[in-house]
Image: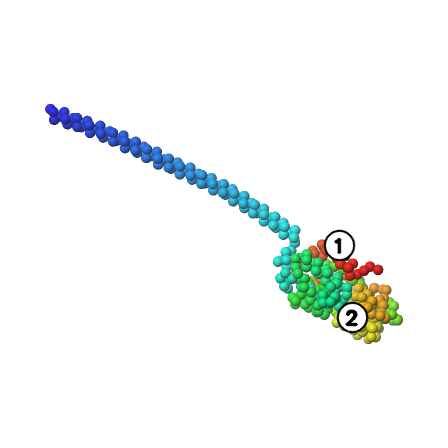
Amino acid sequence: MKKLIAALITCTLTAAMLTGCGSASDDTGASSGQDVNAEITQADDTEKESEADKTSAGGENTKSDSDTSASDSENTAADDEKGTAPSELKTVKEGVLTMATNAAFPPYEYYESNEIVGIDADIAKAVADKLGLELKIEDMEFNSIIIAVTQGKADMGLAGMTVTEERLESVDFSDSYATGIQAVIVAEDSDIAKIDDLSGKKIGVQLATTGDIYAKEDFGEENVEAYNKGADAVMALKQGKVDAVIIDNQPAIAFVKSTEGLKILETEYAVEDYAAAIAKGNSALVEAVNGALTELKEDGTIQEIVDKYIVSE
């Protein structure tokens, strides 16, 4: 009997212990489950915060892209206002505008000490400044100017050059920047008083100028003597080798002023416009030069240059 009671007591104690352990295990399990759930929830919150940050950053990036686009638009607009940039222009030498001329044609181009000056030289300098380029002037025979331009040795030719159909076959021209008049120089005691009187006379001209072209067309090649320089033609007149010289009016005035015994006929032989010769196909340079010339006309710069060299009587 005692053994039976002892066994019952033992079973009872064992059951009680097992129940206590089960409660502790459940509590631990519950606590562990709660901790895991808390960690998952926290992780989810972190993920949401991260996604929110990304969304915010995306918004900032979108704004930044928008700002960049706006900035690009502003830059494009600024470039449009500036016109053709120097880097976009095709020139013989980068950053330099090379001008071919014949510096024996006052007041358009001539030497003052060792420097080439004159109306064309000053206008070319003003154009180069507008385009952000340095000007370089190359002196050569008039007949070589268009050749230099077509062969890529010069960017443009400025030499009191008139636009003609023949020249347009070789080069393009800018807008006109000045008007020229072909005049006739004769000896003071000459019997030549008007253009018609030149018929059958020996006429001196500068080679390849419009005076040369027109004289040969009007009076025949056999009656025209061409010289490399206008001054050489005037000297031939002074020496009696020719009866008259056809040349642009402003150089004619300068030659007559410096040479005794000569005069200019009051009648005009031809009126023409001067322009810059530019290589065919270089449309960017033609447009840039035209744009610069337009601005220089509008702000009075070209007129100031002309007035500087040609004093109104």
Residue 17 x %, y %: 22, 29
Q: Which residue is drawn at 35% across and 35% down?
A: 35
In this picture, is 37 found above or below 100?
above
Q: Quadrant of the N terminus?
A: top left
Q: What element carries label 2?
A: helix
Tell me which amino acid carries mark 1.
Gly
Nearest the eye: 237 or 136: 136
In this picture, is 164 found above or below 38?
below
Q: In which quarter of the image is the C terminus?
A: bottom right
Tell me which amino acid carries mark 2.
Ala
Indicate left or right for 57 with 165 as reference.
left
Residue 96, by quadrant, is bottom right
Indicate left or right for 66 with 249 as reference.
left
Categorize mark 2 by other alpha carbons within 10 Å: few (<14), some (14-19), many (20+): some
Q: Which residue is drawn at 78% across and 58% down?
A: 307
Q: Distance between the residues labelled 1 and 2?
A: 32 Å
For marks 1 and 2, the one nearer the N-term is 2
Residue 174 x %, y %: 71, 60
- Observer able to see residue 146: no
Residue 210 x %, y %: 77, 67
Residue 227 x %, y %: 76, 72
Q: Which residue is drawn at 17% across and 28% down?
A: 10
- Label 1 close to label 2 by CB (< 8 Å): no
Residue 2, by quadrant, is top left
Q: Which residue is drawn at 47% across and 41% down?
A: 53
Nearest the eye: 77 or 166: 77
Nearest the eye: 86 or 174: 86
- Judging by the rendered image, the residue that carries numbered circle 1 is 300
- Judging by the rendered image, the residue that carries numbered circle 2 is 231
